[in-house]
Image: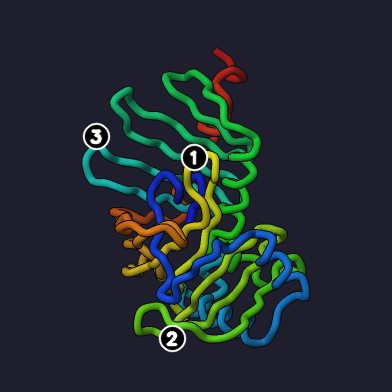
Amino acid sequence: MRLYLIILLASAIIISACSKSKRTTQESLLKITSSGSNAAGRGAVEKLLRFVGGSARVRSIKTLRLTYGDSESTKAIFSIVYPDRVVAQISTPHGIDLAVQNPECYWVRDNRLLGVSPNKCVIDNQNLAHNFVNVLQHIDSPHYSFFSEGIRKVGDNPATVVDVNANGAVTRWWIGEDGRLLQELYFSNETIGLGTLIYRYTEWKEVDQLNYPVTYESRDEIREGAPIVSRISKVELNPTVDPTLFIKPDSKRN
């Protein structure tokens, strides 16, 4: 799950079992994936596609809604419209805040527009681009590549490490022998104090013939510290998403 302004707001990530002293960079993954896919990388991603629910099921997903939290005071609802729009409805002491990727990025509070830096917007849009559902929907695109340099362990589980280039947005996946995505690398916004993060997916749930991770741990790639555990309380496939949520307040007609 992995998303991006999404994931950054809802979670944080766990370190790989193979600890690193040097932070992974987007430039290093772009270099690795520049030569295209190899058989091991492509094969592992095809195995993930089968585990998630198959090509037809994945391609049928146009919208996805994820709810975090059970109480109204702590609830956050992320509605994704593939391939490039997300709105997060987040409960705060002020009421409901909206965080929007359209693919512009901005915050709304009390129908007032709050700005987001251009750099932050680019990072968030890239992370939505390599959301695993989005990537699997484009598995046959010539603009997507999957390169594996071998097997590593995530805990006690062997995993194929796959560097993914999703039309210029890069990430690293650890795919288990059964096809499930065990772990994912995520580039966050350094300006808010975070760097390269790792998600470790610990629980998956089948929803309408789609397997989706509903519990994950998150932590910085190289800094010490306890992971944060995030739980998705509800997954909805192809819900109706109000299009007016993506209209900036200053451009709405009264």
Where does label 3 land, which residue?
A: 73
Residue lying at 55% horizontally and 55% vertically, measured from the top left: 187
Q: Does residue 253 sit above or below 164 in this rendering?
A: above
Q: CA distance from mark 2 to mark 3?
A: 40 Å
Q: Secondary structure at mark 1?
A: helix
Q: Does residue 66 sit above or below 207 in this rendering?
A: above
Is any part of residue 133 visible from this angle? Answer: no
Q: Nearer the viewer, mark 2 or mark 1?
A: 1
Q: Position of residue 69 (x, y in %)?
A: 27, 46
Q: Nearer the viewer, mark 2 or mark 3?
A: 2
Query: Which of marks 3 and 2 precedes in the sequence?
Result: 3
- Crowding at mark 1 (Cα within 10 Å: few <14, some 14-19, many 20+): few
Q: CA distance from mark 3 to mark 1?
A: 24 Å
Question: Do labels 2 and 1 touch, CB within 8 Å?
Answer: no
Where does label 1 land, which residue?
A: 192
What residue type is disc 3 on? Ser
